[in-house]
C-alpha cells in the first residue's frame, strides 16, 4: 500500500474481532518482573521529580511531546501513544565503525596505511525512560509504572540534516484515569538528560451513559499489516504500531490537492443488534467556516472500527447560456474542517466530532 492508497477494510475487521493482541498492562508488568523489574536510574528519577510540579524538565536533550493518541487494548486498557519531536543534531549521530582491514598472514615489507574514507552510515544510540504518574482525586501525582526503552537509529551519512526535526513515537498500555507522563531522553552514559512532561486523560468507557464517544481522530498517510504484534515497548521513528498495524500518521494534517482524507477512529458506546452486528451511521462533511464544501453520502458501518478514505472532490455546477453541466474539482487550497456526525441506529446514541486540516 502506498501513501495515497486506500486502507484495506478487512484489516480492521480482524482488529475488531481479535481485540486486541497488543501488550496489556498486566503482561507488561509481568514481563518486566520476569527479567528483573526495570527501574529508572536514580539520578534520572531525581531529575524527573525535580521538574514534575512545574512540568519543566532538564533540557540537555531538547525535545517536546506534541501529540497523543489512544486505542482500545486488552484488559480494559488503552494503547496510549506519545509523539515527540527531536532535532537530529541533538541525537549525536556517530559513524558506524567499518570492519578493520587485517594484514594477511606472512605478508612482508612496509604496509600502507589505509585511506580513511568518509563514513557511509551514521548511528544514534540513546535511552528513553518513561514514568507514568497517576493523579489522585486531589490532583497529586503518584508513580504508577515505569519503563526503559533503549533506542538506536541508523541513516546514510549523506541524508543527515542536523537541523531537521524527526518525529518519534512510543506506546504503552494504560488504564482509564488522569496521568502526567514524564519522558526522559538520555545519552547512553546518562551524562546528557532531556525531560518533558505531558498530561493525558483516558476515558472510562463504561460510564458513557446516553452518548457515544470516539478515540482521538487522526489522518493516516499509510497503514500496513505486520506479521505479528509487538510484544515489548519500542521507540519508533516516523510511524507508530498498534496491534498488527504499522501506521504512518499525518499529524500536521496538511494535504496536497487531489489527496484523500484517510480518517481513522474507534467508536465507543455503540451496541450490536440481535445478529451481533453494529449499525453505525456516519455522515462526513467538509466545511470552510460555516460554508459547506463537500457533503458525502451517509454510510452505515457494521464495525466500531472506522477507516474511511474520503476523496477531496467538489461537485460544481457550471452554467453557460442554456447549457449546464456537472464537474468534479479538487478542493482548492485553504483551511477546512471535517465534521463527523455519528448515530448508533440500535441505541439511537449520537455524537459529533470535528478535525481541522489544510490543503496546500
Image (cartoon, helix red, strand yellow):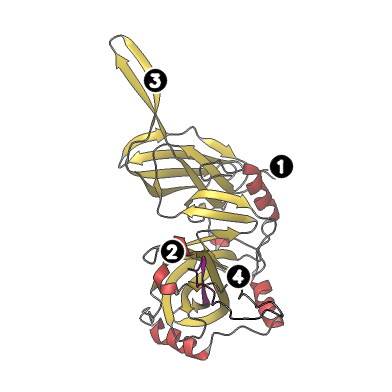
- Residue 280, x across and y down, in percent: 57, 42
Q: Earlier in the sequence, mark 4 or mark 2?
A: 2
**Which mark identifies residue 160?**
2
Q: Quadrant of residue 112?
A: bottom right
Q: Is residue 293 magenta?
A: no
Residue 64 in view here: no
Q: In the rendered view, tell whether residue 299 sits above or below residue 71.
A: above
Q: Secondary structure at mark 2?
A: loop
Query: Can you tell which of label 2 and label 3 is closer to the viewer?
Result: 2
The percent coordinates of residue 243 (x first, y second) are: 64, 59
| Residue sitting at x 55%, y 60% | 240
Q: What residue did someone put label 3 on?
A: 326
Residue range of the region highlighted in magenta in the rendering: 113-128
Q: Residue furthest top?
A: 322
Image: 153 above or below 4: below
Q: Residue 66 occupies which quadrant of the picture?
A: bottom left
- Which residue lies under the disc numbered 1? 275
- Local crowd size for mark 1, using a 10 Å CA cut-off: few (<14), some (14–19), many (≥20): few
Mark 3 or 1, nearer chain start: 1
Residue 206 drawn above or below residue 292: below
Residue name at image x 43 percent, y 86 percent: 47
The residue that mark 4 highlights is 233
Task: Give the Cα separation between the discs numbered 2 and 3.
Answer: 49 Å
Amino acid at each position: 500500500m502506498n501513501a495515497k492508497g486506500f486502507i484495506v477494510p478487512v484489516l480492521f475487521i480482524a482488529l475488531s474481532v481479535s481485540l486486541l493482541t497488543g501488550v496489556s498492562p498486566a503482561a507488561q508488568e509481568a514481563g518486566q518482573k520476569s527479567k528483573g523489574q526495570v527501574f529508572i536510574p536514580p539520578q534520572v528519577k531525581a531529575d524527573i521529580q525535580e521538574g514534575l510540579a512545574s512540568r519543566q524538565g532538564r533540557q540537555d536533550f531538547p525535545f517536546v511531546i506534541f501529540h497523543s493518541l489512544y486505542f482500545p487494548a486488552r484488559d480494559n486498557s488503552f494503547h496510549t501513544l506519545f509523539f515527540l519531536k527531536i532535532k537530529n543534531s541533538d541525537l549525536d549521530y556517530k559513524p558506524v565503525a567499518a570492519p578493520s582491514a587485517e594484514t594477511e598472514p606472512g605478508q612482508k615489507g612496509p604496509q600502507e596505511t589505509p585511506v580513511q574514507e568518509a563514513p557511509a552510515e551514521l548511528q544514534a544510540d540513546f535511552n528513553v525512560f518513561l514514568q507514568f504518574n497517576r493523579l489522585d482525586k486531589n490532583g497529586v501525582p503518584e508513580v504508577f509504572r515505569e519503563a526503559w526503552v533503549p533506542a538506536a537509529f541508523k541513516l546514510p551519512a549523506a541524508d543527515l540534516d542536523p537541523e531537521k526535526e524527526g518525529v518519534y513515537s512510543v506506546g504503552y498500555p494504560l488504564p482509564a484515569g488522569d496521568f502526567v507522563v514524564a519522558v526522559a531522553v538520555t545519552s547512553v552514559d546518562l551524562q546528557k538528560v532531556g525531560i518533558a512532561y505531558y498530561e493525558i486523560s483516558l476515558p472510562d468507557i463504561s460510564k458513557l451513559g446516553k452518548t457515544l464517544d470516539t478515540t482521538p481522530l487522526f489522518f493516516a498517510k499509510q497503514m500496513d499489516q505486520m506479521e505479528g504484534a509487538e510484544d515489548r515497548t519500542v521507540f519508533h521513528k516516523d510511524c507508530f504500531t498498534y496491534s498488527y498495524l504499522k501506521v504512518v500518521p499525518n499529524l500536521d494534517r496538511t494535504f496536497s490537492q487531489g489527496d484523500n482524507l484517510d480518517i481513522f477512529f474507534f467508536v465507543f458506546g455503540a451496541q450490536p443488534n440481535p445478529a451481533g452486528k453494529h449499525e453505525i451511521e456516519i455522515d462526513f462533511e467538509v466545511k470552510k467556516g460555516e460554508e459547506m464544501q463537500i457533503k458525502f453520502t451517509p454510510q452505515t458501518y457494521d464495525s466500531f472500527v472506522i477507516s474511511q478514505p474520503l476523496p477531496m472532490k467538489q461537485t460544481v455546477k457550471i452554467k453557460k447560456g442554456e447549457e449546464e453541466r456537472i464537474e468534479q474539482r479538487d478542493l482548492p487550497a485553504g483551511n477546512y474542517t471535517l465534521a463527523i456526525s455519528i448515530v448508533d441506529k440500535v441505541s439511537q446514541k449520537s455524537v459529533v466530532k470535528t478535525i481541522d486540516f489544510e490543503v496546500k
